[in-house]
């Protein structure tokens, strides 16, 4: 599946600095159509209004975590195939396994740079 640099991407994190960092990294690798949400509930509201090509979500958020968001996205008829990359500060094996079982496409451990992000996106979509 080819990747379009103009595809809409939703980044979800309750830490505004992290949203800025991820947006900056996405800009560095050529993406500019980026929306932000500060938790899973806000993300679901945006997902219901717009067709996204990719979700990049933090794991640890309140009131709805990235893991809960992933499960809701996978349960939705229109969203179950939506590419989803989980970001976390913890590289606990059980978290990675849980996320994989729930249908995550890829997993990034903080901190990460533009090259890592590009590699993870390419692993989901193929090279761009």
Image: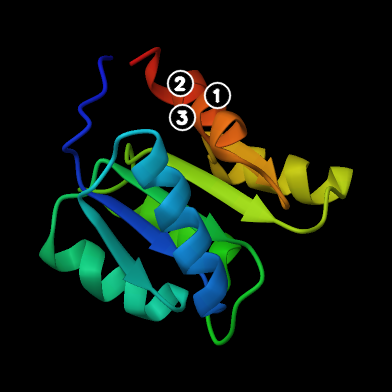
Q: Position of residue 98 (x, y in %)?
A: 72, 48
Name the residue tied to disc 1.
Answer: 119
Rendered position, 24 above or below 58: above
Closer to the camera, 76 or 8?
Answer: 8
Question: Looking at the rendered structure, which numbered label has been put on residue 1?
Answer: none
Q: CA distance from mark 3 to mark 1?
A: 6 Å
Mark 2 crowdedness (10 Å alpha carbons): few <14, some 14-19, many ≥20: some
Residue under the image location 19 percent in, 39 percent down:
7
Q: Position of residue 117 (x, y in %)?
A: 54, 36
Residue under the image location 58 percent in, 72 percent down:
65
Label 2: element kind: helix
Name the residue tied to disc 3.
Answer: 121
Residues tagged 3 and 1 counted as in contact (Cβ below 8 A): yes
Rendered position, 120 above or below 51: above
Residue under the image location 61 percent in, 32 percent down:
116
Closer to the camera, 25 or 109?
Answer: 25
């Amino acid at each position: 599946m080819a990747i379009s640099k103009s595809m809409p991407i939703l980044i979800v994190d309750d830490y505004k600095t992290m949203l800025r960092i991820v947006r900056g990294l996405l800009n560095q690798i050529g993406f500019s159509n980026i929306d932000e949400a500060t938790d899973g509930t806000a993300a679901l509201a945006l997902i219901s209004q717009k067709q996204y090509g990719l979700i990049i979500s933090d794991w640890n958020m309140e009131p709805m975590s990235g893991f809960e968001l992933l499960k809701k996205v996978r349960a939705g008829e229109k969203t179950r195939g939506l590419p989803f990359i989980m970001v976390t500060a913890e590289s606990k094996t059980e978290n990675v396994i849980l996320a994989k079982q729930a249908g995550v496409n890829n997993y990034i451990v903080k901190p990460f740079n533009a090259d890592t992000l590009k590699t993870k996106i390419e692993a989901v979509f193929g090279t761009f």
